[in-house]
Amino acid sequence: MNRILIIAEAGVNHNGSLDTAKALVMAAKECGADVVKFQTINVDELVSKQAVMADYQKNNLGTEESQKDMLKKLALKKEDFYTLADYCRETGIKFLSTPFDIESIHFLNPLQDMWKVPSGEITNYPYLVEIGKTGKEVILSTGMSTLKETADALEVLNRHGAGKVTLLHCTTEYPAPLEAVNLRAMMTMQNQLHCRIGYSDHTKGIEIPVAAAAMGARIIEKHFTLNRNMPGPDHMASLEPEELKAMIMAVRNVESALGDGIKAPSECEKKNIDIARKSIVARRKIKKGEQFSSDNITAKRPGSGVNPMRWNEVIGRCAVRDFDEDELIQI
């Protein structure tokens, strides 16, 4: 069974600092994540002057500035991504960054072997075409989307040559209320669109991504930060390193417990079969030639004798010898 891919979403929680971004890389590696993901933001290509901040951004930042002004403070320089990609290789964790415009797709293409498409780009046709044309694996977040919109985006990616596509169920609110998560929608996408599925989590805590893993998610993505008290729009809805480590451990435990789906005794159980199961035994002393009946036989442990599922086969036969009380019956 392929391992669940765990993406530690650093996003813009570096607050525009390369040193903080590198610290996030190291923290993700130490917590056991497979991938650390950033966001490559070309502010002038991403938002217009009229774009406003989301309510959660206003609340977390305590300001009414424009989305553009906010993002300018959070964006890393282009050269920083070369440094981060190299640092990830040295650290032993996969580098990934989400582009938000076509220019950033071209910029990031040499630096990574897969794409993470954010929920906000699922209806961006020219963007999806460019992603598909690279031929690389795609992880597509589906927050705010209907099944039809998700299917349309999937069709565009496939038609233009995208590699394997995994659909991440997502609730685009920070933090996402539990009653809005609707994890069963992840299974609907799997059943209706015949795709690998995963989950990008914006809830508080670790329970929901662990539940998603138990339901069959092949990718889990979760925001994390070095410190939730840092200034910035996403820190409050992110896990701190110890919490991320606990989530990853829990996901790995669930993954181990899921197994291969074959219903058969596990190796560790086999030694307990005879101890826990029963056999047909003499209820009382039985004389040779006496006919077996429910009056003189019963089922008791251990399970090393005749299986009680053969009860009707034994009833009516004659004892081949004398049997003491509780002795295993032989036929």
Image (cartoon, grey):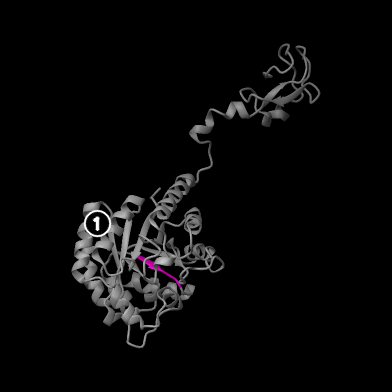
Q: Residue 262 in the image: state x and y as whole percent.
A: 50, 43
User: Can residue 75 be seen from the camera position used here?
Assistant: yes
Q: Residue 91 in the image: state x and y as whole percent.
A: 24, 52
Q: Residue at x 40, y 80 (%)?
A: 63
Q: Residue at x 38, y 55 (%)?
A: 241
| Residue 75 is one of the magenta-drawn residues | no
Q: Is residue 294 left or right of residue 50?
A: right
Residue 272 sits above or below residue 5 on the image: above
- Locate the C terminus and report the quarter of the image it occupies: top right
Viewer-nearest residue: 299 or 55: 55
Range of magenta residues: 139-143
User: Can residue 113 be seen from the camera position used here?
Assistant: no
Q: Is residue 87 left or right of residue 30?
A: left
Viewer-nearest residue: 318 or 304: 304
Residue 47, by quadrant, is bottom left
Residue at the far right in the pictured view: 295
Residue tagged 1: 88
Q: Residue at x 75, y 22 (%)?
A: 297
Judged from the image, the secondary structure of the residue bearing numbered disc 1 is: helix
Tell me if mark 1 has few (under 14), some (14-19) or many (20+) residues whose alpha carbon lies within 10 angstroms of its own.
many
Q: Residue 25 in the image: state x and y as whole percent.
A: 29, 57
Prevailing secondary structure class for the magenta stretch in the rendered image: strand
| Residue 142 is one of the magenta-drawn residues | yes
Q: Is residue 287 left or right of residue 101?
A: right
Q: Amino acid at mark 1?
A: Cys
Viewer-nearest residue: 289 or 41: 41
Label count reads 1
